[in-house]
Amino acid sequence: MAKKQTKQTAKKNDDRKTFAFIATFFGIVGFIITIATKRKDKYVMFYAKQSLTIFIFAIIGAIISSIIGIIPIFGWIVSEAIRLLILILWVFSWANALSDKEKETPVIGQYAKNFNF
């Protein structure tokens, strides 16, 4: 019986990690999927909130990049740095979601706590 419980627990953890990864990998679409299917799972919702935070940060970064990108050389460098930062944060969120631990995304993860769903 203990073996059966262990398999069920392992399957549940795999499902949690899979949905957490879906939330982070697919951005706002993943967020909507996890809100619709796994709203009660604290672990999955943690990463859904992280995903939403990264999405909002990406939108703000895109706006800043398009405004500052007009400036020759300096604007282009800053725009590319913002895009690279967003990509790095996105990849960090994937790795964290698959870690089976609730780890905030560096720099912006703390803002996810402000969302209450």
Image: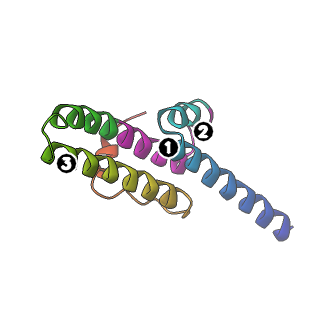
Amino acid type, mark 1:
Met
Residue 51 placement, left or right of 114? right
Residue 72 placement, left or right of 96? left
The 10 Å Cα crowd at callout 3, few under 14, some 14 to 19, many 20 or more, is some
The foreground one among 26 and 64 is 64
x and y, in percent, of residue 83 in the image: 32, 46
Q: Is most of the magenta stretch helix, strand or loop?
A: helix
Specify the label residue 78 is tagged with.
Answer: 3
Work out whether mark 1 precedes mark 2 in sequence or the reverse, and give the earlier one. Answer: 2
| Distance from Cα at disc 1 to Cα at disc 2 | 7 Å
Q: How many marks?
A: 3
Residue occupying image coordinates x 30% and y 40%: 57
- State which quarter of the image contains the C terminus: top left
Residue occupying image coordinates x 40% and y 38%: 52
**Residue wearing tag 2:** 38
- State which quarter of the image contains the N terminus: bottom right
Amino acid type, mark 3:
Val
Specify the label residue 66 is tagged with.
Answer: none
The 10 Å Cα crowd at callout 2, few under 14, some 14 to 19, many 20 or more, is some
Residue 13 placement, left or right of 111? right
Work out whether mark 2 precedes mark 3 in sequence or the reverse, and give the earlier one. Answer: 2
Amino acid type, mark 2:
Lys
**Residue wearing tag 1:** 45
Depicted 18 relative to depicted 116: above or below:
below
Q: Are marks 1 and 2 in contact (CB under 8 Å)?
A: yes
x and y, in percent, of residue 36 in the image: 59, 29
| Distance from Cα at disc 2 to Cα at disc 3 | 38 Å
The range drawn in magenta is: 37-55
x and y, in percent, of residue 69 in the image: 20, 37
Question: Which tag is nearer the camera, tag 3 or tag 1?
Answer: 3
